[in-house]
Image (tube, rainbow, N blue to C red):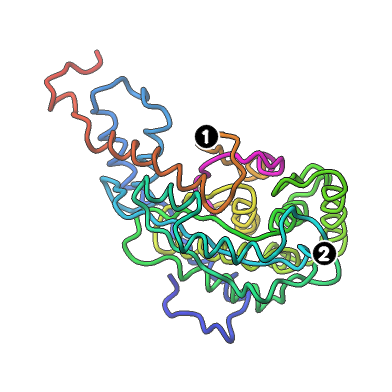
Amino acid sequence: MPDKPFDPKTVSLDEMRALFRELPGPDLEAGTQAAAREAQLTKPRGALGRLEELAAWLATWQGRHPPRLQHPRTAVFAGNHGVAALGVSAYPSEVTAQMVQNFVAGGAAVNQLCRAFDADLRVYELALEQPTADFTQGPAMTGDDCARAMAYGMMAVEPNLDVLCLGEMGIGNTTSAAALACALFGGEVEDWVGRGTGVSGDALEAKIRVVREGVERHGDAGDPLDLLAAVGGLELAAIAGAVIAARLARTPVVLDGFACTVAAAVLWKVDPKALEHCIVGHRSVEPGHSRVLEAIGKEPLFDFGMRLGEGSGATLALGVLRAAVECHTGMATFADAGVSGPA
């Protein structure tokens, strides 16, 4: 985390840009210790495949060996979008606030997943009564508003978290994410736009048109953080801030689906090393998700045909991470078990 908290009244995107010079690298000693133990466990080398990689990744970015998974947190950021008024979603904007109340009451899918994997759930509202501006008419946010949302997202990272799972809730945010991804990585608008909450027909055409107008208006807005302000959302900016803060605090991050990954991809576009402490829980059925995953070089842990958001896929990935930690720390070594090692 920064040496001192940002002043929410004066924080700027330039301050956020400066943080990229402070991002710590991996703890190579912890990684070496993980590799040494893995080589002694009672199994053929590499037999647990990606579970072995995940154990080493956790150790490397937690900065300790053995890795642990005793205090995972899922953070869900909620924001509203001005473009939702243009008919791009199957649901009205008031559903965002209603779903936040559902999270609080324990009735959402992510609540059940957090319960299943003993994760701490936190939900962060970002001025739901003040949606971002319609980005077809002007920038969605000012630079200062974007920076404030990023600083707010940084607050989700507290001491002693073992893993941070990130997610979002916001009617219209797949429209914002599609515009942001297209502005960042190029390509045809239609390739980035999916059905989101289930739109089709005229509503899908309206969504494509809105994304195209946003990209045409703001595609040359400036650097990636400027693009985030121009066509992004408050909750997407908060996710970007949380990813930065997690890196500074040496907290590994699990990203959720399309909108969440696009928010993090803004940071990758600034510095390709900025997401080394992140993995992606699942591959969303949103077509743009596969495209952005390919662009940033991330392979998700699983593909279950999910497209819910709200951190559901990231939280479900905790089951895989817990398995990786248990195998790495709990298995006997060849010497402990009296089993002959490889010849």
Q: Which mark is residue 302?
A: 1
Q: Is residue 305 above or below residue 27?
A: above
Q: Position of residue 138 (x, y in %)?
A: 83, 72
Given residues 10 and 110, the one toward you in this image is 110
Estimate the spatial distance between the alpha carbons at disc 2 and disc 1, rounded to whole Å: 34 Å
**Quick one: 25 or 243, which is closer to the camera?**
243
Counting from the top left corner in percent of width and height, residue 45 is at 33, 23
Rendering coords of residue 137 (x, y %): 86, 70
Mark linked to residue 43 = none
- Residue 190 in percent (x, y) is at 83, 44
Q: Quadrant of residue 263?
A: bottom right
Write the residue at 83% across / 50% down.
Answer: 203
Q: Amino acid at mark 1?
A: Phe
Looking at the figure, which quarter contains the C terminus?
A: top left
Asked if 272 appears above or below 283 in the picture, the reply is below
- The three-letter amino acid code for the residue at tag 2 is His
Instruction: Name the residue furthest top.
Output: 343
Quick one: quadrant of the N terminus? bottom left
- For residue 286: magenta? yes
Q: Which mark is residue 218?
A: 2
Which segment did they paint magenta?
274-291
